[in-house]
Image (cartoon, grey):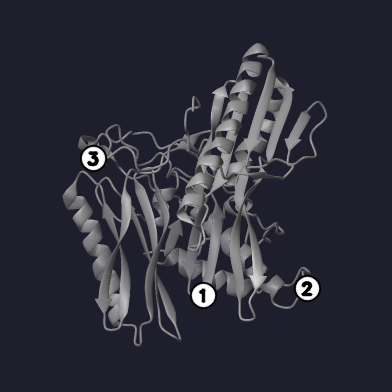
Amino acid sequence: MTIRKQSMTITICIILTVLLIGCNHPTSKDNTSDSNSSTSIAQNDNSAEDENNIIPTEKSIDLYGTYDQNDLLIETLEEKYKEVTLEIPQLNGLKDQKIQEKINQEIYQRIMEAVKETPDLINASHYTYSNFANVISIQTYISNNETSKQLYFNYNLINGEELKLEDLFLKDTDLLTIIREAFYKTLVQFHLMDGMNGQVVSLDENELYRIVKRYNNSENKTFSFSPSDIYLYYKDYAASVSMKDHADQICIYSKYLTEDSLYERNDIGKKNIFTCANFPDNLFKIFEFGHLEDNLWYDVTVWNQQFDETIDSAKKEQFVAFEERIYESVFQQIEEYRKTAQEHPDRFYIFLAKPNVYIESESVWNGEFWDMTYTNRACVNENIQIFEMPMTLYESIYKDKIIDAYRYRYFAMQGGVYLDSEVEEGVTLTEKREEKIVPFME
């Protein structure tokens, strides 16, 4: 293929629209004078870490910018504890082995302490929220039949120190107001879901005050974060802060960047992902997108496909070859539009393809279960959208539409980026969505 491969992500937070907080819980800077008063965040002094080649500028999030995932593996250490196999996250790939060992030991010890405090343990697993910009955020879930607990591990990888919530924000950020708004939205959501049929309800202001005060005053605020959101945890409550909505206050994308790589390899993490967008790891066989020309954006997304174990190996081999030819034809069409884009620099072209190719199957009920057999035919749907528009319309509307499509929370469920078929005036849309059934066996 002549098209360069780039990888990016997805996801927009679904934002709960709520009423502004009342006078006791303002959305602007708070001027209260008690122990719950607003305090600014002190900027960390990075001067002592010059030997790590830290890029000194802490910047807010560029919503038109991109970021890279770390070239770091977060592997699973399986360890037997009584009758349960524990799954413990462990880092692999830092150049500085002392820092890697420090983080791994701290994670291991905290998990083992929690496991030993959990009677009748049935599960210990983990999930990676963040692995980018020289920081990580990992959640470990430990449970028995009655209770569960979560541990959160947030580290900067330059020196292996744990991150505090304040480290994610710029100096002088009014963190108290952000915390208050996040928990306010959570409590409103709880009330709306508690049998109120979606009506606006009266919120217990005292409950909100207690939660915010205790969380804000805690020395170690419990949190995790993804590229799109920051999650705050207090007892049974979980609140979220959209990074996109607070882009001018958050610096985690830039704060711990270094001129020299911290990693042994350079081919693990995905690169050039839009800020505030997550990446759906291991979901897709093909996930390529980017600018081929200044006026051509392309995206080709193909799901990983699982085959039934009963399929004949020769048939599977021929189908895979046929499948690849279909995908290659899609890229050839993109190359044709590349030529068109070069000929019309005042026009912008968007080529989106989610080709779906699978073997036709037949099922017969044998009295106990369905017997499935694969035919020699394939179902093919190129599922293509092609938008053509004036460059001015792209700059004013569709540039943001494209970026937001990758931030959309349900990107993975949709199987890739798509844009609404209800186009703006001046836009020409061509779609290829017809499903064809064709033989693939020679």
Tell me which numbered mark, 1 or 3, is placed earlier along the sequence. Answer: 3
Tell me which numbered mark, 1 or 2, is placed earlier along the sequence. Answer: 2
Q: Amino acid at mark 2?
A: Asn
Asked whether 414 or 232 is in front, the reply is 414
Q: Secondary structure at mark 1?
A: loop
Decide: few, some or many residues near mark 2? Use Cα within 10 Å; few <14, some 14-19, many ≥20: few
- Residue shown at 54% from the left, 73% from the top: 210
- Residue shown at 64% from the left, 36% from the top: 352
Q: Secondary structure at mark 3?
A: helix
> x and y percent of residue 421 in the render?
77, 40
Image depth: mark 2 or mark 3 in front:
2
Say whether marks 2 and 3 touch (CB < 8 Å): no
- Mark identifier at residue 236: 1
Instruction: Let me know if residue 51 appears in the view.
Output: yes
Which residue is identified by label 3? Answer: 49
Q: Amino acid at mark 3?
A: Glu
Q: Amino acid at mark 1?
A: Asp
Instruction: Let me know if residue 249 appears in the view.
Output: no
Left or right: residue 397 compared with residue 404: right
Q: CA distance from mark 1 to mark 3?
A: 38 Å
Q: Going by the picture, which residue comes out furthest to the front?
A: 442
